[in-house]
Amino acid sequence: MISTVNRLTLALGMVALTLAGQASAAAAAPSENATINLIRLLVQQGVLPQAKAEALIAQAEQEAQQARQASAAMAVAAGPAAAPGDVRVQYVPAIVREQIRDQVKAEVMATAKQENWAQPNTFPDWVSRISFDGDIRLRQESRFFADNNSNEIVDYAKLNDNGPYDVNKDTNSKLPPLLNSREDRDNLFRLRARLGMKAVISPEWTAGIRIGTGSDNNPVSTTQTLGGGFGKKDIWLDQGYLTWKATRDLTLTGGRIANPFYATDMLYSNDLNFDGVAAIFNHKLNTDWGLFGTLGAFPVEYTNDTATSNGFDKNESDTKWLFGGQIGANWKINRSNSLKGALAYYRFDDIEGQRSSPCAPWAGAPGCDSDGSRVAFMQKGNSVFLLRDITPNPATPGLTPQPQYVGLASKFDVLDLNLAWDTELPDDLHLRSQTNFIRNLAYDKGEMLKRSEGEIVNNINRNGQFESGGNALLVQFTLGNALEMKKSGDWNLLAGYKYIQPDALPDGFNDSSFHLGGTNAKGYFVGGNYGIDKNIYATARYMSASEVYGPRYEVDVMQLELNTRF
């Protein structure tokens, strides 16, 4: 039999558990009648006295009332009553909710980007690493020649392309190819269109390809002359390169690349690209000073290892190289003035022509051993000489044909100095003053006459004497509210002067518009640019040039352009 103490302890425990269950239940109020019946039962059993039972009943009612109030408040905060199967979650503080939200958002966005479902209209990740750019230029060009120009100026570039040409007037009555020097061309409608693609392979590696128009494969112009019976136009590989960013300051690039040197169009056309490899250095010393430099090696031409396609005799295969090095600096003098300067040296290995050993094409020889020393591309101006030493036919000495090619008479080790000073003027104007001086350190008139064995055929004065020189100079000024056309309302005006002696630099690589390309030219140029809209601008340019030495050849060129880039 349970003792009185034990029964009292059991009863109090049951009451306590009942009250605790009522207070902790969040979904229902405690049952008041059950508690009172239990207490009364304990009184009837003699476990509790009546007075103590009434006190317990009062206390139970008070705690039940508090439980009902707390339950009602939590029900309001929790919202509608839970449906079967729902799970109630206790209140979560705002700061915890924000942390959970940010963490979930970050995880979801990372997954979305990786799986590319956050932006369903975009392309896969590799596409985002490829970019495109390009430009289109429409040009109206007119060429005006002086009436008293010589009409006997030989086009030696075409002579080499179409040759050999028989220079013996007794065996060949046909004229050599001659330059147009007197007939004006009032209009040439021309187009330049280029499209480039750049792919970021990794943070350090980039590949690029660009295609462009062009009337032929000459290296100095991608301009296509329109017309020709509406025939389709050619597309050429303009660039194709691979670039490695070795360090923050050093980049290595190879293939067919953009001009890596700081230069003017007096030496290198703006459309000229280089075949080879280059190391480009750019380092900022501080906010006012920066250094830059370039080293490059470029195979200009591989000479053929055969004299002709059907000859048994083979000639040694050589490579004509351009090696270049440049060092320069940028100096921010003050808020309104900055200076940029660079000194470069370019060595053109084996670009000069070589006089052949005695040869006899008239006797069936397939060619002469120096035919490969003629350059792959030339414009005009450089001093040239007849390459072949053709032995006379003993039977008819005076009637021996003389089929000839021409080669460059001078070697070329070019020193190139460039300076550009930018200054800000009142009324938001900018002025750029540029000068470019070039000296061919390898120019030697006596050596040229010796190399050619007296067979130089151009740059001859009225007295029949050979004249040339190894210096070139450019001065240019640009004034406007912007030096580069980027938006509507940008404008500038420019004016300058060029003086290029015949053998100051190779004539095959510079601007093809001034004096219609090449060297042995002097004259002025003026022009202007105006921004029509963002990345759309108009250009007007007028160039007037004549020869430095030799027969008179004066030509004025006017160009009107509409330029766009994207």
Image (cartoon, rainbow, N blue to C red):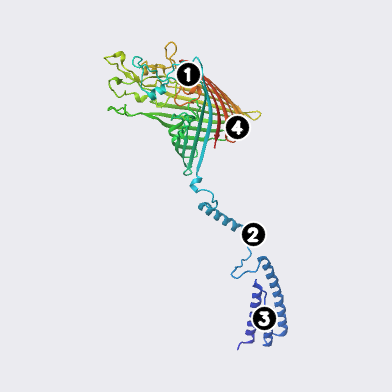
Residue 414 percent coordinates (x, y):
45, 24
Pointer 4 residue: 531
Counting residues from the N terminus, which is met first, the one under dot 3 or under dot 2?
A: 3
Q: Residue furthest left?
A: 395
Distance from Cα at disc 2 to Cα at disc 4: 55 Å
Q: For residue 432, what is the image quadrant?
A: top right
Image position of 44 with respect to 138: above or below: below
Q: Which mark is residue 161?
A: none
Amino acid type assigned to the residue bearing label 1 in the image: Ser
Q: Which of these two is toward me, 11 or 310?
A: 310
Q: Which marked residue is nearer to the observer: mark 1 or mark 4?
A: 1
Distance from Cα at disc 3 to Cα at disc 2: 41 Å
Q: Which mark is residue 34?
A: 3
Pointer 1 residue: 181
Pointer 2 residue: 94
Q: Which of these two is toward me, 143 or 491?
A: 143
Q: Is residue 484 visible?
A: no
Distance from Cα at disc 1 to Cα at disc 2: 87 Å
Q: Which marked residue is nearer to the observer: mark 2 or mark 4?
A: 4
Counting residues from the N terminus, which is met first, the one under dot 1 or under dot 4?
A: 1
Q: Residues within 10 Å of mark 1 (few under 14, many from 20)?
A: many
Image position of 289 with respect to 388: above or below: below
Q: Is residue 356 visible?
A: yes
Residue 523 percent coordinates (x, y):
52, 19
Q: Residues within 10 Å of mark 4 (few under 14, many from 20)?
A: many
Image position of 561 with respect to 96: above or below: above
Q: Quadrant of the N terminus?
A: bottom right
- Secondary structure under tag 2 reads helix
Distance from Cα at disc 1 to Cα at disc 4: 35 Å
Counting residues from the N terminus, which is met first, the one under dot 1 or under dot 3?
A: 3
Distance from Cα at disc 4 to Cα at disc 3: 94 Å
